[in-house]
């Protein structure tokens, strides 16, 4: 036989394990790289993950995208170097070690026996803890990437390139020393990069309070400010207003106070009030509509922001106000007495009258810029003496003050907000290189200067979790690249104690030269270089390295050049391949790795680091929440792979919204459905091809050998169609993959599998079984083989396992010495093969249109049968296809034989005269036209109902019709279709412009043919149940009971049918043996039977007749 036998059932994970073993035997990945050496390079940058945890679905998704794109690049003629990388520095590593060693502060690190050295070496020891697991999991997913030649950010070569990058930036004047407000983790006792803060950001509900700041010039008048971070108030240095907003001075009639706030934010103090006119003009109540809107806004605000809002007032005033408020009922709700109800009604009325009274009046209006420079009395005096001389505690102007919240006056604490810092810097309240007021230590506690709250955690002073950072993440600002940590690439800055002299080092060689050290520098971490000093050239003694290390995102952003030790090595290689062709990571990296690479590349080389970028969305739990190990709300990735296979998981992830940055709610069922709906049909098509090829050899001694010269030589319309589709698919994939649109490619690939299995294969089964001769069978086999090979090549980057499995069997019909026209040989792996170019000469739009029409007619014909309870197994005498377009009918005539077979009819009639079969009538859509024409509706009602068949047919085609100079559209008219043929003989159905009519009369000859097919069907079903394969030879014995007269579907005459000489050849051809009465079976053969259906529960029923079957396998 040509091919290995393909089993009926397949275990995808087990087959994948066999493929992995095969790849290992031939060293597939490295072999592919060797084979592609010398081709045009395709540069891929792999973003480095931390190895302190295991891969999750996000890593698997990004890795799958990377693998698909790089495999495709390789299979389209490129050399693709793929190196895995590791992010080995930064907070995740230190945090893990701090938990192990119970380190609470930086002082604890210095207290270790070996100090920073011990700490850093312990970091080094855990940084690659899960690297082997990563390699195993990524390998099991089928991703080809080089782990042996990986890069690590802790490598001395990598760190030296980072030094070079920083020095180059400094030489360009892009580096300065100063202070910057940063997100801060009190748990980790460190500043966070904006990327780290964004990745771990949690929305919390904070208390919002309104605070009044008395004016120095008039303490009775107060600025009203608003904040959601009360704990920052001790650090207040300024109030900020928007220069263009309208502000008002009001008199609060209840508190007897004068207050200043933005007019547009009055509702913050008086939610139920309408803005009054100036002076004493009486307020009017808001309209109901406005009240509803305001209530809605208030409800939304309660959900979104503060739990409570209160204005700070003297206790006496608060008490007075409290006493004025009506007391709540303390008693439980009971049936109220009439007198009690009257009292309550009176109280409510009085309360309403009280509410109608104006709460305030406007005394003056002015622009925000008129308030600039006015001084106020701060709430706390901890830093008054220190900062008052610097110009603090005054009103400044900034356009970041918005109308959507607060009072239009923002309290500024420059140590805790980027906007606060910038506006205070712009107004000279603080200096860029000067100190910043930040009375909170690294553990999040107030220091001794805040005497009322000293040594207390800010959360204890403000019970809600404090939100500081989110708005800070909105805009790109100067990047603070230094961190006060231990485990990282040290900043290469050697400076004098007062920083009046400093040197930025750009290489190990420069450090050795300037320091004069004779020792060999083999590592650049702090504990190995901090002792090295440089002699000052300006009389400042010795220069020592500053304590800080780099933000780890600076390191990962340096990956394109640092991974190959540029510019110290590989200079030509880098300059030849930079920028990279492709990068891919998750949506969270838009502010992380993508961003830092872009910033550094632009600053260093004045060009972007990548030409193409794919951003994938987030993989969520099935309920839409974030995947959580603690909640266990998602299945373990490797359990899913071991259950369904890596190909299924890859295809499920890629054919989802995440590929175009949308979210995916992961379901295990979705992975299972990929196998059921995609891989199993494809596998079954491949299996049927193999079986047919092997049967051709067994039955006719003809061995199938693939010969490309025979491709496209077939005259069969379906062969031409499927080859046209395949080449159109090649053309489509090339265009879409060149634009990195994976999300459009996968649906087309899946659709092609459907066309192959549900249409081509089903319509050509008989041909592949040699029903029309050996030559026709070979045409079908060549077509099927060509399509399967094209599919394995196109799908190889997406589903590397199943394509390899199929290819290893399919290649057996190609001689080892065979060479394709493009010079390719019969390669050992599908992943060494190139994806072929589309053959334009094979693409045939006419054939594709013809088959599309054919499919439409088939579907309509089946609906007609179903509606009339006529199974497809029942042969019919005639079907008529009605369409007024003759070109359509001529194209459809190309598929006449297939139409007969698929609809099981003897004759096809093509008719372009619709009136022979159907008649259209029309009536107006009264609701639409009545509203449109009003009194004229009667006129159009009459005219529409008088439309003849042809007019309505044109109306349906054009979509509109003009009646009495008025254009009427299809949605304004109801079109009825009347079937005018003899309904006892014919049944029909319209589908768009085509009508399918079938003759539903059943003659005795048709019934007998039906019985023949039913008997054959029962035999074939029993063969399958018995575990027999097509090449097994058997004898078939039968016995019939309850036979009837053969006058209907329910009353067959099976014995007469089996013995009818007209059907003998049919049985011989399809069953490849004769049907023998059971009473002729020699008794001694009974012991050899494989399947014996003598149990009445297993009888085959055909109508009222019972058919018993016995198989005996020939040895």
Image (tube, rainbow, N blue to C red):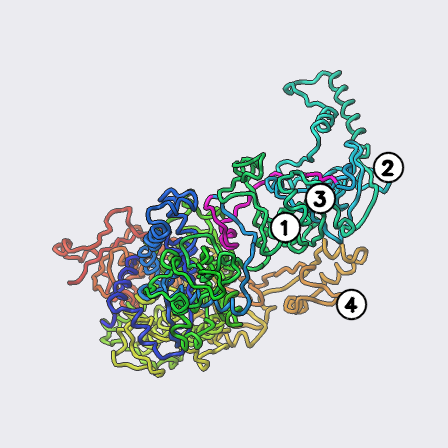
| Quadrant placement of the C terminus | bottom left
Region in magenta: 187-214
Q: Is residue 84 above or below residue 734?
A: above
For label 4, the SS is loop
- On the image, the x and y values in percent for residue 923 come to 69, 58
Mark 3 or mark 1: name the one nearer the start of the chain: 3
> For this view, does 833 lie left or right of residue 976?
left
Q: Nearer the viewer, mark 1 or mark 4?
A: 1
Calculate the distance from the C-alpha at mark 1 to the C-alpha at mark 4. Answer: 68 Å
> What is the spatial separation of the Cα atoms under label 3 and label 1, in whole angstroms?
16 Å
| Disc 3: which residue | 407
Between the C-alphas of marks 3 and 2, the distance is: 24 Å
Which badge, 3 or 2, comes first in the chain's sequence?
2
Q: In the drawing, what numbered circle is on residue 965?
A: 4
Q: Nearer the viewer, mark 4 or mark 2?
A: 2
How many other residues sit within 10 Å of disc 1, few (<14), some (14-19) or many (≥20)?
A: many
- Which secondary structure, mark 2? loop
Q: Examine the structure image and report whether residue 194 is included in the region drawn in magenta.
A: yes
Q: To which residue does mark 2 refer?
A: 282
């Amino acid at each position: 036989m040509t091919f290995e036998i393909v089993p009926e059932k397949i275990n995808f994970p087990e087959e994948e394990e066999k493929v992995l073993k095969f790849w290992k035997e031939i060293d597939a990945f490295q072999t592919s790289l060797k084979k592609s050496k010398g081709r045009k390079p395709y540069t891929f940058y792999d973003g480095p993950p931390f190895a302190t945890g295991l891969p999750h679905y996000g890593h698997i998704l990004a890795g799958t995208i990377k693998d698909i794109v790089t495999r495709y690049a390789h299979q389209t003629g490129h050399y693709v170097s793929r190196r895995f990388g590791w992010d080995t520095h930064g907070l995740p590593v230190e945090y893990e070690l701090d938990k192990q060693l119970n380190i609470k502060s930086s002082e604890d690190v210095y207290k270790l026996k070996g100090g920073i050295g011990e700490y850093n070496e312990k970091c080094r020891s855990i940084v690659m803890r899960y690297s082997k697991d990563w390699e195993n999991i990524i390998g099991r997913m089928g991703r080809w990437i080089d782990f042996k030649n990986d890069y690590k950010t802790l490598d001395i070569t990598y760190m030296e390139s980072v030094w070079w990058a920083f020095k180059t930036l400094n030489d360009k004047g892009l580096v300065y020393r100063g202070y910057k407000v940063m997100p801060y983790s009190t748990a980790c006792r460190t500043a966070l990069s904006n990327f780290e803060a964004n990745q771990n950001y949690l929305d919390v509900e904070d208390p919002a309070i309104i605070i009044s700041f008395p004016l120095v010039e008039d303490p009775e008048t107060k600025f009203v400010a608003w904040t959601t971070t009360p704990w920052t108030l001790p650090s207040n240095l300024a109030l900020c207003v928007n220069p263009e907003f309208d502000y008002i001075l009001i008199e609060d009639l209840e508190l007897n106070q004068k207050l200043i706030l933005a007019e547009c934010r009055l509702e913050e103090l008086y939610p139920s009030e309408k803005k009054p006119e100036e002076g004493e003009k009486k307020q009017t109540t808001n309209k109901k509509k406005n009240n509803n809107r305001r209530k809605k806004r208030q409800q939304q605000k309660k959900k979104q922001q503060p739990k409570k809002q209160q204005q700070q007032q003297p206790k006496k005033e608060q008490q007075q106000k409290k006493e004025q408020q009506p007391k709540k009922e303390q008693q439980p709700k009971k049936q109220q007495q009439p007198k009690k109800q009257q009292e309550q009604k009176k109280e409510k009325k009085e309360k309403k009258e009280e509410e109608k009274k104006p709460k305030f009046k406007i005394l003056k209006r002015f622009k925000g810029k008129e308030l600039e420079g006015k001084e106020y009395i701060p709430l706390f005096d901890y830093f008054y003496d220190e900062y008052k001389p610097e110009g603090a505690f005054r009103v400044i102007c900034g356009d970041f003050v918005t109308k959507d919240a607060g009072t239009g006056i923002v309290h500024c604490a420059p140590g805790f907000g980027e906007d606060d810092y910038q506006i205070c810097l712009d107004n000279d309240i603080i200096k860029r290189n000067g100190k910043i007021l930040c009375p909170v230590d690294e553990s999040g506690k107030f220091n001794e200067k805040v005497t009322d709250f000293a040594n207390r955690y800010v959360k204890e002073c403000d019970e809600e979790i404090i939100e500081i950072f989110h708005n800070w993440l909105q805009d790109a600002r100067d990047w603070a690249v230094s961190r006060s940590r231990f485990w990282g690439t040290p900043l290469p800055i050697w400076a004098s104690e007062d920083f009046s002299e400093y040197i930025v080092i750009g290489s190990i060689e420069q450090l050795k030269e300037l320091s004069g050290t004779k020792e060999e520098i083999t590592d650049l971490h702090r504990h190995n270089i901090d002792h090295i000093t440089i002699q000052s050239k300006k009389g400042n003694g010795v220069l020592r390295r500053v304590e800080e290390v780099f933000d780890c995102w600076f390191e990962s952003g340096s990956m394109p050049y640092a991974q190959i030790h540029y510019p110290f090595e590989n200079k030509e290689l880098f300059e030849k391949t930079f920028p990279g062709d492709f990068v891919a990571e998750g949506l969270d990296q838009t502010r992380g790795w993508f961003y830092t690479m872009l910033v550094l590349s632009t600053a260093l080389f004045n060009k972007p680091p990548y030409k193409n970028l794919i951003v994938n969305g987030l993989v969520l739990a099935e309920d839409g929440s974030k995947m959580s190990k603690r909640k266990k709300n998602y299945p373990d990735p490797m359990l899913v792979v071991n259950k369904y296979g890596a190909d299924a998981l890859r295809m499920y992830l890629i054919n989802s919204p995440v590929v175009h940055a949308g979210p995916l709610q992961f379901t295990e069922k979705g992975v299972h459905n990929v196998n059921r709906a995609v891989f199993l049909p494809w596998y079954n098509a491949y299996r049927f091809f193999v079986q047919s090829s092997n049967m051709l050899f067994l039955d006719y001694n003809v061995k199938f050998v693939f010969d490309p010269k025979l491709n496209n030589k077939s005259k069969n319309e379906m062969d031409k169609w499927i080859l046209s589709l395949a080449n159109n698919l090649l053309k489509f994939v090339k265009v879409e993959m060149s634009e990195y649109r994976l999300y459009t490619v996968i649906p087309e690939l899946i659709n092609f599998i459907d066309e192959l299995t549900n249409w081509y294969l089903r319509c050509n089964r008989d041909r592949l079984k040699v029903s029309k001769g050996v030559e026709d069978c070979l045409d079908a086999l060549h077509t099927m083989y060509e399509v399967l090979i094209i599919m394995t090549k196109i799908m190889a980057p997406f589903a590397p396992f199943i394509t390899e499995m199929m290819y290893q069997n399919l290649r057996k019909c190609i001689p080892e010495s065979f060479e394709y026209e493009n010079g390719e040989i019969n390669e050992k792996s599908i992943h060494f093969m190139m994806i072929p170019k589309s053959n334009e000469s094979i693409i045939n739009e006419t054939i594709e249109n013809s088959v599309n029409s054919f499919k439409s007619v088939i579907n309509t014909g089946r609906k007609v049968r179903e509606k009339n309870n006529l199974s497809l197994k029942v042969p019919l005498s005639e079907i008529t296809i009605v369409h007024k377009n003759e070109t359509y009918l001529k194209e459809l005539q190309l598929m006449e034989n297939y139409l007969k077979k698929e609809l099981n009819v003897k004759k096809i009639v093509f008719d372009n005269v619709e009136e022979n079969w159907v008649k259209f009538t029309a009536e107006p859509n009264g609701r639409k036209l009545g509203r449109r024409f009003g009194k004229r509706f009667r006129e159009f009602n009459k005219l529409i109902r008088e439309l003849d068949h042809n007019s309505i047919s044109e109306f349906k085609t054009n979509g509109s019709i003009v009646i009495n100079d008025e254009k009427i559209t299809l949605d304004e008219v109801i079109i009825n279709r009347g079937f005018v043929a003899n309904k006892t003989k014919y049944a029909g159905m319209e589908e768009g412009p085509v009508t399918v009519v079938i003759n539903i009369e059943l003659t005795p000859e048709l019934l007998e043919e039906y019985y023949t097919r039913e008997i054959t069907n029962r035999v074939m079903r029993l063969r399958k149940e018995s575990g027999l394969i097509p090449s097994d030879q058997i004898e078939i014995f039968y016995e019939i009971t309850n036979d009837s007269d053969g006058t209907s579907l329910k009353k067959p005459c099976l014995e007469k049918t089996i013995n009818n000489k007209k059907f003998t050849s049919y049985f011989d051809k399809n069953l490849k043996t004769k049907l023998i009465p059971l009473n002729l079976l020699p008794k001694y053969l009974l012991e050899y039977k494989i399947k014996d259906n003598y149990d009445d529960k297993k009888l085959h029923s055909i109508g009222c007749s019972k058919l018993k079957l016995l198989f005996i396998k020939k040895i």
